[in-house]
Image (cartoon, rainbow, N blue to C red):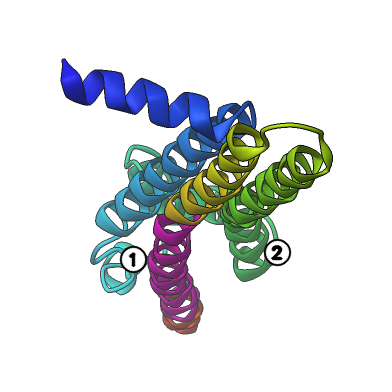
Amino acid sequence: MEIFEKAIEYWQAGGILLIPIAIVCFGVWIYFLKSRDELLRTLRDSEGIDEELAERLGGGDRGAASKFYASRPGMLAQALANALTGGKDPGDSFARATGQSLSFLRRDLVVLAGLTAAAPLLGLLGTVRGMIETFTGVAAAGDTADYVAAGISQALITTQVGLVVAIPGVFGIARLRRLLGSVKTRVDSCRAHLSYALSRSEGK
């Protein structure tokens, strides 16, 4: 109970700017977890898919291979299904499909980066607001101790909370960029295997 009361006092001392910082904090974690799950699921669903292309296209039946990949989950499987459905250049169709999917993954990463950058800026805004209240208290007549204490407390708390929110976001962005790099590598590998498998099947 005492911890809860101290938390409320801490929140009140931080001022109204702790509300948008808290909203940014939820946004950072929501986008991080969402993006991480999507990237990990993409990697899991596409595991080994590039190496089996030669076997699936060995007989030259693109229709059967397209139906097989259409029944599988994942970005790469669906891109392969669309690429093998028709068209003169399956490689180009595959590149367009995967490029569109990757753009959605990058968009979430950009939003996460924006939220991470917003947290310390909101903390800095709280610092400025707290210092204004501090100087207002110093300039006021009479006892200024309460004004100064409240202003400095708000300035320090908002800065602290803003940094605490931003630090996990920075590490989260680094983690997501590594995962996105792994997805791009697998996409490039799959495209290369697709071109090789198609060239072999057409050469028979």
Give the residue displayed 63% in from the left and 42% down from the top: 148
Segment tinted magenta in the rendering? 166-194
Answer with left or right where residue 36 lies relative to residue 118: left
Kindly indicate the quadrant of the structure image that contains residue 185.
Answer: bottom left
Kindly indicate the quadrant of the structure image that contains residue 167.
Answer: bottom left
Mark 1 residue crowding within 10 angstroms, few (<14) / some (14–19) / many (20+): some
Q: Residue furthest left?
A: 1
Give how far across and how far down residue 154 sits, in percent. Answer: 58, 40
> Residue 104, can we see it?
no
Answer with left or right where residue 72 lies relative to residue 144: left
Q: Residue furthest front?
A: 142
Q: Residue furthest top?
A: 1
Q: Amino acid at mark 2?
A: Lys
Q: Nearer the viewer, residue 198 or 37?
A: 37
Q: Nearer the viewer, residue 161 or 200?
A: 161
Q: Which residue is label 2 attached to?
A: 88
**Mark 2 falls on what kind of element?**
loop
Q: Amino acid at mark 1?
A: Gly
Q: Nearer the viewer, residue 161 or 204?
A: 161
Disc number placed over residue 59 in the picture, else none: 1
Give the foreground label among 1 and 2: 2
Q: Earlier in the sequence, mark 1 or mark 2?
A: 1
- Name the quadrant of the C terminus: bottom left
Give how far across and how far down residue 1 sits, in percent. Answer: 16, 15
Magenta portion: prevailing SS class:
helix
Q: Nearer the viewer, residue 121 or 181?
A: 121
> Residue 176, can we see it?
yes
Give the residue displayed 38% in from the left and 21% down from the top: 8
Is the residue 158 above or below the residue 169 in the image? above
Give how far across and how far down residue 70 sits, in percent. Answer: 41, 40
